Amino acid sequence: MLVDYFKILEIPEDASEMEIKRAYREKAKQFHPGINKSSDNLDKFILVNEAYEILIHKNTHEIYLQDFRTNHDPLKHEVYYYWINAARTRAAQHASLSTSEFLKSKFYRNTHLYSYPVLIIFLIIGLLLLLAPFVTVVTVEQSLGIFFILAVIFIAWPLGLYFFVQAAIGFQSIKKYMTAK
């Protein structure tokens, strides 16, 4: 029988990325062995991690949904089987960490979601940094030299692009979350 990952994370089948991340963060804290000392918490923690990793990735999510609705065995798909084993292995590693180490881990931090005001700030900073090279080329005197102009271009442009993309991804997640409700 196929495990119901939606039930484990307590989310609807059409949950957005934001809902999946929020549910994971809540459940991971609830069942981490450093916080919850019950006898079956390790198994629940591993299932929560497995559910998150399968549902957050588009390919495995689609395979899981197809098999969940038709009662096929998803473990027959090599990719899916690989992801489940990888998720279980990572979950066991995370369970062996102290709670504070787990909450500081890169894996857990990647489930963080930015708030709307932070995304607005990212967007503004991104746009300013993307425009900085053009403004610099137009307004800077030749006395500052080509190295200054190149530094502005090769530093400001990638940083601006990073902030702009982070804002765009965040707004997209918020939009999915708001329309899913």
Image (spheres, rainbow, N blue to C red):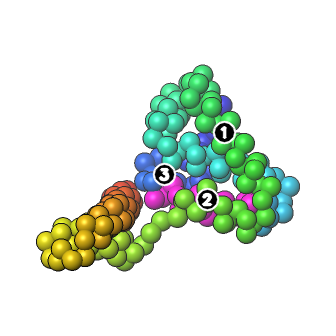
- Residue on which disc 3 sits: 12
Discs 3/1, front: 1
Residue 27 in magenta?
yes
- Residue on which disc 2 sits: 106
Nearest to N terminus: mark 2 or mark 3: 3
For residue 47, say whether it is visible.
no
Characterize the magenta stretch by its predominant secondary structure. Answer: helix
Which element type, helix, strand or loop, lies under badge 2?
Answer: helix
**Image location (x, y in percent) of residue 172:** 34, 58
Horizontal arrangement in the rendering, residue 62 relative to residue 73 (left or right): left
Nearest to N terminus: mark 3 or mark 1: 3
Q: Which residues are magenta?
A: 18-32
Q: Nearer the viewer, residue 142 or 106?
A: 142
Depicted 168 relative to depicted 125: above or below: above
Horizontal arrangement in the rendering, residue 19 relative to residue 156 (left or right): right
Residue type, mark 2 in image: Lys
Residue type, mark 1 in image: Ala
Q: Nearer the viewer, residue 13 or 122?
A: 122
Q: Nearer the viewer, residue 124 or 142?
A: 142
**Circle 2: is it few (<14), some (14-19), or many (20+) Cα within 10 Å?**
few
For residue 169, say whether it is visible.
yes
Discs 2/3, front: 2
Looking at the image, which residue is at 69% across and 46% down? Answer: 90
